[in-house]
Image (cartoon, grey):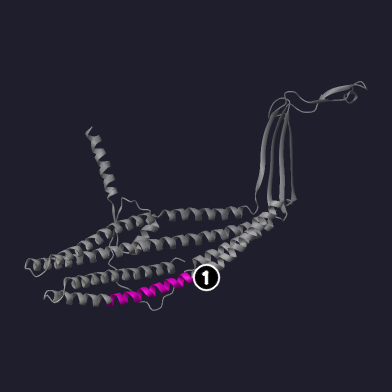
Amino acid sequence: MKSTFKIFFIILFSFQARAQETIAFKSIDEVLAYAEKNASVFKISNEQMALTKYQTLIAKINIFNPRGNATASATNNLQLPSNYLPAEIFGGVPGTFKETPFVQQYISAINITPQIDLINIQSWQKIKVSKINENLSETTQLLIKKNLFENIAMTYYTIVSIQNQIKILETNYANNKKIEDAVTNKNKQGLARQQDVNQATVNLLQIEDKKSQLTIAVLQQKNALKVLCDASLETNFEIINSENKIENITTIEVSNKLLSQQSNLQKELSQQELKSYKSSFYPTLTAVGNWTYQDNSNIGFFNENSNIFQSSYIGLRLSYLLPEASKYLQKRTLRTNLNVAVENAKHNQLLEKSTNDQLKLEYRKTIDSNNISEKILMLKTDTYNKNLEIYQQDLVSIDNLLISFNDKLNAELNKIISQVNANYLRTKININNTIK
């Protein structure tokens, strides 16, 4: 009984330990590596790639389309069919007839009829279809990977941004607390009104409220990141990011062409499918053969005194399937699909160029915004420090002090948001230039 309880507690403890598993990430690269190892989308992609490779292999085998029938039979004729022959053949009286069986009772047979295509143009064309489809599948999987990595990067840097904002709020909460204490002391000395104390306290509560909202937001984003990485929601993701440096790159290139590559392959696939279907109107030349073994006896199956017959042949067969009306409709459908694929390829090429250019412009804009926000922060901080100094000398009101304090706080938040956004866009550019 005691051993049973021990096993129960060991199992319970193992479940709790698993539920409290913590994974720490120090960079976006670590998160992407974790996602590539665990995300189900990559496992599905591998299965799909394996399927397309198998389809190509089968298409190569199907060039000759080896096929055939093999049958074996054993027949016991319980009542033998017979016919009447002139009796004089057997030495009988002319003009009379004798009943004679024409089939032996026990008949065993094996029949094999192999066939193999020598010329089947449609099968040759289908190899090209399968190969293009394999390349299309590879490109599609890379696009899926790129889009997933971009979503992961966006979620990751959102978490980094929120965590940094929380740190800024915590620091400024302490500074605001000092202001509240200073106003309270002045109020006790009769040098400040109760309204001033209330105003400082309200400002403090607003910071608490914003921090509380951001704390919930970071939990929501971590859950979103777990879903993207296919991690258990019970797993604790700890994001430790100390990346503050921004690379002010003057020349930026985004060279990802997966979308246009996918569209061009889709166009090639539609062209080849139409070409393959047209070739189905051509005749097929097939090598055919046959081997037959037959064992006949009136004593039993496979008797040593039975009559054995064997026959075989080889030959060529030219077959042509007369087209039905539905084949012409299918041909028209494939031609329409090709026209659609051509237009999609043109559109996606323009869309891809626009997206790449937009990403470069976004990064440059963010760099400029970050530089400006840094200057604004310096000025707002200087204004706040001066107002705090002269407030202590009773030369400025609490209103102006709190306004300058909140301006400095917002400037700090804007600075960190701009900085993290620049790092996110830089990572997104790297993803686009790497996965191709």
- What is the x, y in percent for residue 234? 31, 50
Q: Residue furthest bottom?
A: 250
- Residue 119, visible in the rendered structure: no
The answer to which of 231 and 75 lies nearer the viewer is 231
- Left of 265 or right of it: where is 90? right
Badge 1 is on which residue? 350
For image coordinates 37% across by 77% down, the residue present is 249
Main secondary-structure element of the magenta-colored stretch: helix
**What is the crowding at mark 1: few (fewer than 14 residues within 10 Å), some, or many (at least 20)?**
few
Looking at the rendered structure, the kind of residue marked 1 is Leu
Q: Is residue 239 above or below residue 318?
A: below
For image coordinates 23% across by 38% down, the residue present is 6
The answer to which of 359 and 98 lies nearer the viewer is 359
- Left of 327 or right of it: where is 382? left
Q: Magenta part of the protein: which range?
A: 353-375
For image coordinates 49% across by 71% down, the residue present is 353
- Left of 176 or right of it: where is 325? right
For image coordinates 56% across by 62% down, the residue present is 266
- What is the x, y in percent for residue 17? 26, 48
- What is the x, y in percent for residue 183? 12, 68
Q: Is residue 209 magenta?
A: no
The quarter of the picture where residue 197 lies is bottom left
Q: Residue furthest left?
A: 189
